[in-house]
Image (cartoon, grey):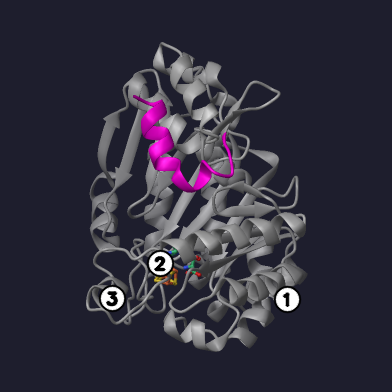
Amino acid sequence: MTPPVPDHPTRDAGFGVYLHWPFCAAKCPYCDFNSHVRHAGVDEARFLAAFRAEIAHVAARVPGREVTSIFLGGGTPSLMRPETVAGLLDAVARHWNVVPGAEVTLEANPSSVEAGRFRGYRDAGVNRVSLGVQALDDASLKTLGRLHNAEEAFTAIRIAQSTFARTSFDLIYARPGQSPAAWRGELREAIDRAAEHLSLYQLTIEPGTPFFGLAAAGKLATPDEETGRALYDVTQEVCDAAGLPAYEISNHARPGAEARHNLLYWRYGEYAGIGPGAHGRLVTAEGRLGTVTERGPEAWLGQVEARGHGIAETETIDPGSQADEFLVMGLRLTEGIDPARYAALKGRPLDAGRIATLMEDGLLARREDGRIAATAAGAPVLNALVAELAK
Ligand SMILES: C[S@@+](CC[C@H](N)C(=O)[O-])C[C@H]1O[C@@H](n2cnc3c(N)ncnc32)[C@H](O)[C@@H]1O
Ligand code: SF4
């Protein structure tokens, strides 16, 4: 008999499964995600067998869950054959109960979009696609080291929208030389093409990437802080006016079209992280566990083949740290957090005096439903806000 599912304060946020496909056709110079190029090709069948084994291992640890969302992320999952995607989704459904209407997202690069392949993903059970468009002009796409041009991005968007009812695309802004006026025009064009959801990320210069080296050598001029703030403000203004308000710092959607899987992270739900370098948060009788798997694709594969899983670290997250994680994630959301849940996790409520001061400073607001959320002024300084509240 399946043991009862342990209760926890954020259980209604759902249970998700994240599957990480760690391969790309080329490495973008700004990217520090766990993504690798394998010119000799990837043995998909062998990786699929390893994913199946790890899914079985994790499901034995957290049995009886109702899966509310699945996310195939990367890397570039759209490099997978549809049969591989079908095999992954089949393995999830074999071990857990996937609820009817569960959101199943696949991340895709415009350079690997083909109509036939997309239909294959849809037939496999994918019902939402997130496209890495990044920019709408050829010069910017070249600077970003992308393999597609703008025309190919538009074609990919059309194919995605004609195949899937739910689509999103990602853009990176605060790119070298980008002015707020140029971003305003680009964003408006993006919204004209977007169906229901956009992820808009400010370019971050990550240590260890080629962009980091170029920036350090003075060869890559990204917008200064003031321009960065102006670009952020343009983002909010244009999206609000178009009916795609932010529901999270970098994510915008028509009301009701929010990404359920991502909401689960920010609402501090439970999720399994499968595949190389994936993180999970599992609630067991021993408490909430943080898991992380081997990062290197071949190292992960070797571990799974040797012992049935590639989990490299498992830590029990103490209640205080759970409350802090809940706060860090939840305040990214426009809906904010329920302070009663914070108190349930932490064992004591948030400091009323600190809340009052942050409200007086205009950084925090209490909503009608009693939730606490960052204001428009608080959102850009979220880290400082969280650090103050969590003291
Ligand atoms: C890990 S990628 C996966 C999607 C897909 N491989 C692609 O690039 O199209 C997810 C998203 O993270 C964003 N991203 C990656 N590195 C970034 C950086 N340094 N700054 C801002 N956004 C970044 C990009 O918008 C990208 O679409
Ligand atoms: S395609 Fe996506 S995951 Fe791959 S290197 Fe580029 S940004 Fe990173």
- Amino acid carrying label 1: it is Arg
Residue at left 50%, top 82%?
141
Which residue is at the front of the view, 151 or 204?
204
User: In the image, is residue 389 part of the stretch drawn in magenta?
Assistant: yes
Q: Can you see residue 60?
A: no
Which residue is at the front of the view, 315 or 304?
315
Residue at left 38%, top 39%?
384
How far apart, in angstroms, are the residues tagged by discs 3 and 1? 32 Å
Is residue 88 depicted above or below 183 in this figure?
above
- Amino acid carrying label 2: it is Asp
Q: In the rendering, which numbered label is found on residue 210?
A: 3
| Position in image of residue 11 (x %, y %) | 55, 25
Overall secondary structure of the magenta stretch? Answer: helix
Q: Residues within 10 Å of mark 1 (few under 14, many from 20)?
A: some
How far apart, in angstroms, are the residues tagged by discs 2 and 3? 19 Å
Residue at left 31%, top 22%?
318
Q: Residues within 10 Å of mark 2 (few under 14, many from 20)?
A: few
Residue at left 64%, top 21%?
370
Circle 2 sits on which residue? 224
Circle 1 sits on which residue? 158
